[in-house]
Image: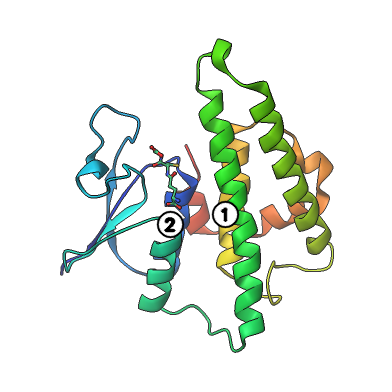
């Protein structure tokens, strides 16, 4: 049987989100490990942006960007149905915040890997402020809720877990758990599931 191929890395939070979705939806795939920072990344042959994740479908179609891929996977194997527009809106709203946290922490990370003399301290502060503001909103919400949207697990929770674990991986000196107790509790809820353990950034 022809399988879907996923070009990715073991560290990208965007790729991890897709890997967890594929596992949860029982969609078989071949993982093609790539290094987007190498001189000739494999993904460049399929994505002019040179970014991962990128999926190659058995039909020959190519799809890039974790948001688009996630939407496609949900068409392929629908997640538990969301009955109303309000329920869909809740998932979209919280997922956007969680995606934004990933985008922000990746920007922070890219600044970290520049030569020390060139690093822009105001940029670090700007990204950290964004993260703190998002964390405060999430923490207040999670004081009253187990899950982000509609009191049930959704792709918004999956995305937030990828964001939090990426921050632990790349911004390990920030003890956010000491500041945000509800987020700390949230993070433990999914930590023991196989799809999350197997894809932990390393
Ligand atoms: N909006 C894209 C962002 C993907 C992205 O930035 N991936 C990183 C790896 S974590 C990458 O490929 N970076 C290389 C580059 O931007 O040149 C998505 O959601 O998939």
Image-quadrant location for residue 116: top right
Indicate left or right for 53 with 149 as reference.
left
What residue did someone put label 1 on? 99
Asked if the residues shown at circle 2 and circle 1 are in contact, with their CB atoms under 8 angstroms apart, the answer is: yes
**Is the shortest distance between ligand 1 and the CB of mark 1 under 8 Å?**
yes
Residue 156, quarter of picture: bottom right
Number of numbered discs on residues? 2
Query: Does label 2 or label 1 sit earlier along the sequence?
Result: 2
User: Residue 123: x percent and y percent?
Assistant: 64, 29
Tell me the residue at 55%/32% (across/down). 109
Report the Cα–Cα distance between label 2 and label 1.
10 Å
Tell me what residue is drawn at x 66 percent, y 73 percent: 90
Q: Is residue 122 above or below residue 83?
A: above
Find out if the beta carbon at label 2 lies less than 8 Å from the nearest ligand 1 atom. yes
Element type at mark 2:
helix
Residue 121 at x, y percent in the picture: 67, 22
Which image quadrant shows ligand 1?
top left
Tell which of 33 and 112 is nearer to you. Answer: 112
Judge from the rendering whether residue 154 lies leftward or rightward of residue 58; answer left or right.
right
**Above or below: residue 140 compared with residue 87:** above
The residue that mark 2 highlights is: 66
Quarter of the image with the N terminus is bottom left
């Amino acid at each position: 049987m022809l399988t879907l191929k996923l070009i990715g890395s073991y560290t990208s939070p965007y790729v991890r989100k897709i890997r967890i979705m594929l596992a949860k939806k029982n969609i078989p795939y071949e993982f093609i490990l790539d290094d987007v920072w190498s001189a000739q990344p494999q993904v460049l042959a399929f994505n002019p942006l040179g970014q991962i994740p990128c999926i190659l479908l058995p039909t020959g179609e190519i799809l890039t960007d974790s948001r688009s891929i996630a939407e496609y996977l949900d068409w392929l194997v629908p997640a538990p149905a969301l009955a109303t527009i309000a329920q869909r809106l809740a998932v979209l709203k919280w997922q956007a915040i969680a995606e934004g946290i990933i985008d922000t922490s990746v920007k922070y990370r890219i600044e970290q890997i520049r030569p020390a003399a060139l690093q822009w301290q105001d940029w670090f502060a700007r990204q950290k402020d964004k993260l703190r503001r998002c964390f405060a909103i999430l923490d207040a919400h999670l004081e009253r809720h187990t899950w982000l949207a509609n009191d049930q697990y959704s792709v918004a929770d999956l995305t937030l877990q990828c964001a939090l674990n990426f921050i632990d991986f790349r911004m390990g000196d920030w003890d956010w758990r000491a500041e945000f107790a509800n987020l700390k509790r949230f993070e433990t809820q999914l930590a023991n599931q196989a799809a999350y353990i197997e894809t932990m950034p390393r």
